[in-house]
Image: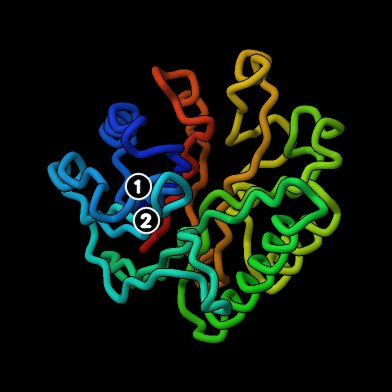
Amino acid sequence: MKIASFNINGIKARLSALGDWLDEAQPDVVLLQEIKSVDEGFPREPFEDRGYVVETHGQKSFNGVAILSKLPLEDVTRGLPGDDADDQARWIEATVMGDTRPVRVCGLYLPNGNPAPGPKYDYKLAWMKRLEDRARELLALEEPFLMAGDYNVIPQDEDAKNPEAWREDALALPQTRAAFRRIVNLGLTDAFRARTRGPGHYTFWDYQAGAWNRDHGIRIDHFLLGPACADLLTDCQIDRHVRGGEKPSDHVPIWVTLDA
């Protein structure tokens, strides 16, 4: 089972680029972030024509998450539990029925949090606490699950080409990294770091200041796997080359393969 995460930065603007990558990479399941579309406006046909079931949790003009799946989906839910007043479309989860077992997949678009300090950063930290609580609930079930998407977290300095440039940014503040570590330390596995060590591995390059050409990237898109899911992990890779394509997103896909 190949599961990918991709912050697409506007589904309509990236329709061609996303279609090309799907045809090349052939993922079974894709978790999309920043679709920037209401549910009824999401362009389903190009994906359904490729054999994908489409589930969305959209919002006008910004945010929005979706699941594309060639495998059967069950029990699709929308919205991260813990705050009924939160109307931002940042969370979708479903059970994917694999060949040998089901896997619960959670697609997330974690708040950016800038400027920090401030209300947006407070929201980010509160959202991460809710994410920690949801991880605890999923762990208690002792079943395979993963939480993947744009975390807007640079876990360590080695995850940025120029760490000093991010020192005061909400993506790398000590409180942000501590909140991320609390989630991982529940017993989750950072799938990419389980397979690849060292600096120089990024999933995001800003459109500004020639970041892509200078390789001024950061690793902020992550797969966190529960223990039963980590046991199934066979690979995790970043499709870096996608950033060099025509009209690219500022993020690139990251994917795992599971023996499921």
> What residue lies at 75% left-to-right and 28% top-to-bottom?
161
Query: What is the three-letter code of the residue carrying label 2?
Result: Gly
Give me the disc on residue 22.
Answer: none
Q: Which residue is mark 2?
A: 58
Residue 177 sits in quarter: bottom right
Residue 21 pos. (x, y %) = 34, 31
Residue 199 vertical placement versus 121 (above, below): above
Q: Does the CB distance between marks 2 and 1 fall below 8 Å?
A: yes
Give me the disc on residue 37.
Answer: 1
Residue 133 pos. (x, y %) = 63, 78
Residue 144 pos. (x, y %) = 46, 72
Left or right side of 230 for 219: right
Q: Secondary structure at mark 2?
A: loop
Left or right side of 220 for 16: left
Q: Residues within 10 Å of mark 2 (few under 14, many from 20)?
A: many
Mark 2–mark 1 distance (CA, rounded to whole Å): 5 Å
> What residue lies at 41% left-to-right and 48% top-to-bottom?
32
Its colouring scheme is rainbow
The image quadrant where one finds the N terminus is bottom left
> What residue lies at 74% left-to-right and 49% top-to-bottom?
155
Residue 168 pos. (x, y %) = 85, 42
For this rendering, which residue is in front, 74 or 78? 78
Mark 2 or 1 closer to N-term? 1
Query: What is the three-letter code of the residue carrying label 1?
Result: Ser
> What residue lies at 75% left-to-right and 68% top-to-bottom?
182
Q: Looking at the image, how many numbered discs can be counted on the residues?
A: 2
